[in-house]
Image: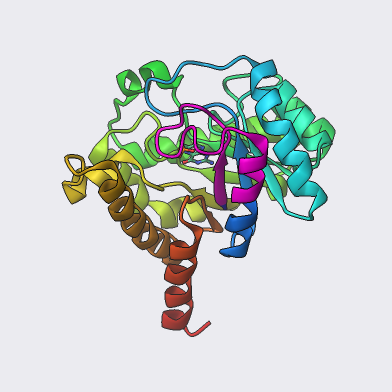
């Protein structure tokens, strides 16, 4: 899954693809690099980010979603808003990627069910503005999986069967540095729950922390974070996940080719 953020303030690529034409061109580059799905987002979820109103979000994403869908791309819409999810699905998106797992907007799961879309349910304990305040766990892996199962059950109650659900442990969402590694170590248990699993580690702060890369210049940090992302993607694939959400699709494709060769598949 290639990341296409159409936002002026996303933490790593914010602002670069804010205009629809530039976003479309970047989407085509991601497909050429080997992305199977393009994840279009119009609201930054970086730590401390302010919420964007749904009409601004839709102005940003809908032209990009419809242009990519018209070209035959599989598009997911990265949103926490039911109205944006519905508008994007009607513009051609097949998957609704909600980092809040349906918690931010109670209308989202019923809307996804009514539109017959698929849904990514992220593990989430509250808005980005204060998510680290909620990063208190006795057992982060067990609690993350338990809370995701509860969201899967909420989706089923809204009319979305597990076959249309993808679970995402929400790396960086309400989790501090080492807690993210604990969750990644527990991926085989999450895969064992049943639905497909998606993981998003791309360029996240917990990677820069172990690299000691935070003090580097921005470009150097990005290159090192992309390499670390390719490695985590390979390890996630070995753990049995269905998908990885990344900025640098080419590097992750290469990493996944290595995994396939290693596994002889
Ligand atoms: N992370 C971000 C945004 N959307 N969606 C899913 N499913 N999983 C994630 O981990 C995730 C996401 C934040 O990263 P970005 O600002 O680079 O998009």
Residue 206 location (% of width, % of height): 28, 42
Viewer-proximal residue among 47 and 190: 47
Q: Which residues are magenta?
A: 2-26
Viewer-proximal residue among 118 and 21: 21
User: Is 118 contained in the magenta span?
Assistant: no
Residue 98 location (% of width, % of height): 59, 33
User: Is 16 contained in the magenta span?
Assistant: yes
Q: Residue at x 55, y 26 (%)?
A: 43
Q: Residue at x 78, y 48 (%)?
A: 69
User: Is 188 situated above or below 101?
Assistant: below
Residue 214 location (% of width, % of height): 21, 40
Viewer-proximal residue among 231 and 157: 231
Using the rendered image of the protein, determine whether residue 159 is visible from the camera's viewpoint.
Answer: no
User: Is 134 situated above or below 62?
Assistant: above
Q: Is residue 191 left or right of residue 214?
A: right
Give the quadrant of residue 102.
top right
Using the rendered image of the protein, determine whether residue 123 is visible from the camera's viewpoint.
Answer: yes
User: Is 188 situated above or below 258?
Assistant: above
The residue at the far bottom in this view is 264
Count of numbered labels shown in the rendering? 0
Viewer-proximal residue among 215 and 97: 215
Q: Residue at x 33, y 33 (%)?
A: 175
């Amino acid at each position: 899954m290639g990341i296409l953020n159409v936002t002026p303030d996303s933490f790593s690529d914010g602002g670069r693809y804010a205009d629809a034409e530039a976003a479309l061109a970047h989407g085509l580059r991601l497909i050429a690099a080997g992305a199977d799905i393009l994840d279009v987002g119009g609201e930054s979820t970086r730590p401390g980010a302010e919420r964007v109103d749904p009409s601004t979000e839709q102005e940003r994403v809908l032209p990009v979603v419809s242009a990519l869908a018209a070209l035959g791309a599989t598009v997911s819409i990265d949103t926490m808003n039911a109205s944006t999810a519905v508008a994007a699905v009607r513009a051609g998106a097949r998957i609704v990627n909600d980092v809040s797992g349906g918690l931010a907007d109670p209308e989202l799961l019923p809307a996804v069910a009514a539109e017959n879309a698929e849904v990514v349910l992220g593990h989430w304990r509250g808005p980005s503005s204060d998510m680290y305040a909620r990063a208190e766990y006795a057992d982060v892996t067990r609690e993350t999986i338990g809370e995701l199962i509860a969201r899967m059950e909420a989706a089923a109650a809204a009319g979305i069967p597990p076959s249309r659900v993808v679970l995402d442990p929400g790396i960086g969402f309400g989790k501090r540095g080492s807690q993210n590694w604990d969750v990644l170590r527990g991926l085989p248990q999450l895969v064992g729950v049943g639905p497909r699993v998606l993981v998003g580690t791309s360029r996240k702060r917990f990677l820069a922390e172990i690299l000691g890369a935070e003090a580097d210049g921005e470009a150097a940090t990005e290159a090192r974070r992309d390499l670390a992302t390719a490695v985590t993607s390979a390890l996630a694939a070995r753990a049995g996940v269905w998908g990885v959400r990344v900025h640098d699709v080419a590097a992750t494709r290469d990493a996944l080719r290595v995994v396939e060769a290693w596994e002889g598949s």
